[in-house]
Amino acid sequence: MVRSFSILALVAALSGIATGQQKNDWAQWRGSERNGLSVESVALLDKFEKLEPVWRSEAVNGHTEGGYASPVVSGGRVYINFTPVTTVPIELEFTGHVMNVLGAVPEGVEDALLEKLDTGRKSLAEIKDGRERKTAAGKWVNENLSEEERKLLGGFAIAWAEKGENALTISTLRKVATLKDKKFADQAPLDAWFAENAIEKSDQEIINKAIPRTKRVFDECVLCLDAATGKTLWKKVISPGHGTVQWGGGSSTPLVTSEHLYFLTADGIMYCLDIAKEGEIVWKTQLAKFNNNNDATNSSPLLLDGKIFVQSMHLYALDAKTGEILWGLTEGEDAKKVQGANCSPMPWKVDGKTYVLSGNGRLGCVEPESGEVLWSVGGGTYSTPVVAGDVMAVTVQDKPALFYRISEMDAEALTKDNEVPNTRGSSFATDGNRFYMQGKTETAAFDAKSLAELWRVKNNGDHFGSPIVADGKLIGLSDKSDIWMLDAATGDMLGKFPAEILTCTSPVLVDGFLYIRGKENIICYDLRKDKK
């Protein structure tokens, strides 16, 4: 089924393209206010059972094959950045790891000692259970080798003895030792080396099995869809095969304006793309990289007064037009107060001045022009803080959520650790009157002024994804692949159905249509009460 825009929606979409974001667009992480609130007035279904999708997009890899970014919608278009994985051939290299797998003989060990050890290995070869053979190998080494011999052989003795039938012959071990750090373009020259060195067939099989033949790399990719039909309008591969996949690539939900799309890659590169030119790169800026090589980046950029704010190990402010780094909290005490790569910066306006709230573990209030950290408190990790009045709500992974009364100068803790449900890392949603959270075992609502608990219900599935508020309903996703809807005032269940959602992502609502990132594509559902 393909949905059609009403005349009003079509005009709104065209206006959005011409003049910029519309208030009811979901053009950034957590919506127009970055707090999970849908500000549109479209009436939604009072209840639902299983809904059929309006459309499904082309394939969009997720999880470890493509990251966990959520979609955004602006000007009648849906945007998503993801990291499809490609397996590519590599040179056959005898790395340190490969040498250890095969058995790297310590220097100075005579063949006589290796033959003695080989006798023990052969006596253990019939023990098929790996754990039992390892125990037996340790016992044999302690009983049959002197203290000096054990010291000379080191850990090699037990490691080689426990290999059983998968150990190389002594002759081959000596020859393989000469290959450390050597590379072969493919199998043909390695086979030639086997022939030249008279390597037995059984040893060839062991060596071939130990050497990696391929590696998995990811492509940074941005997809633009028609919001009405799900049809692909353009697809841009930003940097093909540029990194090794560790956790699934980047998970930075993009930010889109009337002209540009901004997102952060897994290896800390901030991109600005021209959406009118099908994702042509306007600028890119290298920020701090992860220490463990292309793990994941979850922070989604904030646009404020011509600056892009984003967490990439540290909090940075960039010129939105040029990508120039204006400041970065990369060292000193302020850097310790606002660091990490998962929290997405949140704007907070008070007395006509806007500040930035951000950070993992420690959550800081930052002056956006100078980068000065005015105060910092506990909280953050994977979540984005939200504010209602002068109260800030923030979750902490696997710990109770926290509330603070905040001002320009400080933040005062308002709750005890055991008063609020635990969460895996989802963000609060707020409509200004209530705070809503999806915890590990419970979903709950709190009065935004008194913080009195309004309701608490058994959770709809432990999840990192964050719920949204719209038309008096609370809508969320569960790790059981369900979309659920509660009455925001009472917590009563209004519907739940399976939808093949991608865990860790959050729903998007525009003009009464719900957009989610599924396990294999983007999916659109019609939640409008009035279908006309």
Image (tube, helix red, strand yellow):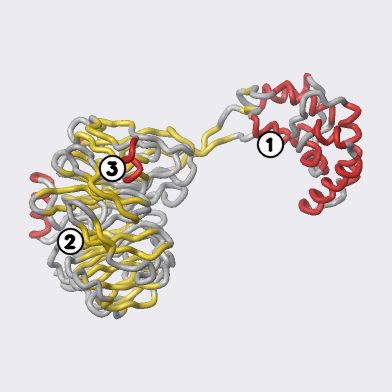
Q: Does any portion of residue 54 appear in the rendered image?
A: no
Mark 2: secondary structure:
loop
Alpha carbon distance from label 1 to label 2? 60 Å
Taking the image as shown, residue 284 lies to the left or right of residue 203, namely: left
Could you say where residue 203 lies in the image, as x and y percent from the top left? 79, 33
Report which residue position mark 2 lands on. 390
Mark 3: secondary structure:
strand
* Crowd class of label 1 (few under 14; some 14 to 19; many from 20; radius 10 Å): some
Alpha carbon distance from label 2 to label 3? 23 Å
**Amino acid at circle 2:** Asp
Could you say where residue 290 lies in the image, as x and y percent from the top left? 43, 38
Could you say where residue 102 lies in the image, as x and y percent from the top left? 73, 34
Alpha carbon distance from label 3 to label 1? 41 Å
Say which of marks 1 and 2 sits in front: 2
Taking the image as shown, residue 461 lies to the left or right of residue 391, namely: right
Q: Nearer the viewer, residue 481 or 139?
A: 139
Say which of marks 2 and 3 sits in front: 2
Indicate whether 378 appears above or below 369.
below
Could you say where residue 488 lies in the image, as x and y percent from the top left? 24, 74
